Amino acid sequence: MTAEFHELPYAHNALEPHIDEETMKLHHSKHYAGYVKKYNDAIAGTDLEGKPVDEVLADLDAVPTELRSGVRNNGGGASNHEKFWHWMSPEKTEPSEELLAAITSAFGGLNDFQDRFKQAALSQFGSGWAWLVIDGDGQLRIVSTANQDTPISQGLIPLLGVDVWEHAYYKHYGPGRADYVDAFFEVVNWDKVSQDYSAIK
């Protein structure tokens, strides 16, 4: 299947003051839209048009060599951002008891998780993402990926991710990636993360 461009589930200014309106407009209408278009252009006329994007990303070795780079970068960008928009909300939410118990078991508590997640985001050299994932054993893990690589390509299931490309924060926070990640925690849609965790478990 071709990737689809979706509107945000909230207004561009809905996450202010944590994520500013101008950044959201550029991030959504330029960067995300660009990934969707370039992915669709890359797979046009191939067998990949009939497969969901995440299914393609889960088996990059099956993608023809001449298409693999474009699929990895732009398919990853489309998939990652489609999830990213829904991992944020203007409404204040909290993890479910089930998810909080799993986070506490894996990391020691919600604050400990946030500290480790933030460190993964700050330690990612250059552009990339930090993720909370479920591995093949059903355990929660924190990982990071470069550029638009997705944990899906590593056999992991992403539950939460933060975009640490400069376009995600530089207009508002400048080089302050740490401040941006702190702000991200203020808008995490824990209802969505909790629902996805419950569905997977």
Image: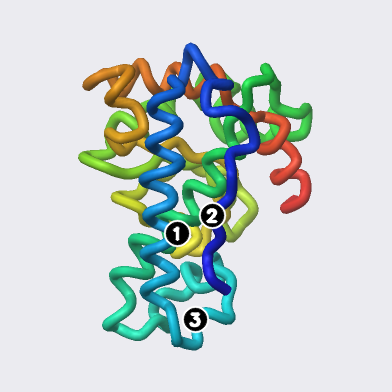
Mark 2 residue type: Phe
Please tell me whether mark 2 or mark 3 is closer to you in this view: 2
Quickly name the residue at label 3. Answer: 48
**SS for callout 2:** loop
| Callout 3 crowding tier (Cα within 10 Å): few <14, some 14–19, many ≥20 | many
Q: Nearer the viewer, residue 2 or 102?
A: 2
Distance between the alpha carbons at the discs numbered 2 and 1: 6 Å
Q: Nearer the viewer, residue 62 or 97?
A: 62
Q: Earlier in the sequence, mark 2 or mark 1?
A: 2
Residue at horizontal 70 percent and vertical 21 percent from the top = 93
Mark 3 residue type: Leu
Q: Earlier in the sequence, mark 2 or mark 3?
A: 2
Residue at horizontal 59 percent and vertical 22 percent from the top = 109
Residue 148's x, y, as percent? 36, 53
In the rendered view, would you say 85 is above or below 177? below
Numbered tag placed on residue 196 in the rendering = none
Do residues under tags 2 and 1 come within 8 Å of each other at their CB atoms?
yes
**What is the residue that sits farthest to the top in this orientation?**
17
Residue 165's x, y, as percent? 31, 38
| Callout 2 crowding tier (Cα within 10 Å): few <14, some 14–19, many ≥20 | some
Q: Nearer the viewer, residue 29 or 140?
A: 29
Quickly name the residue at label 1. Answer: 36
Mark 1 residue type: Val
Quadrant of the rendered structure where residue 172 is? top left
Residue at horizontal 56 percent and vertical 46 percent from the top = 83
Please tell me whether mark 3 or mark 1 is closer to you in this view: 1
Q: Earlier in the sequence, mark 3 or mark 1?
A: 1
Q: Nearer the viewer, residue 126 or 52?
A: 52
Residue at horizontal 41 percent and vertical 74 percent from the top = 60
| Callout 1 crowding tier (Cα within 10 Å): few <14, some 14–19, many ≥20 | many
**SS for callout 1:** helix
Quickly name the residue at label 2. Answer: 5
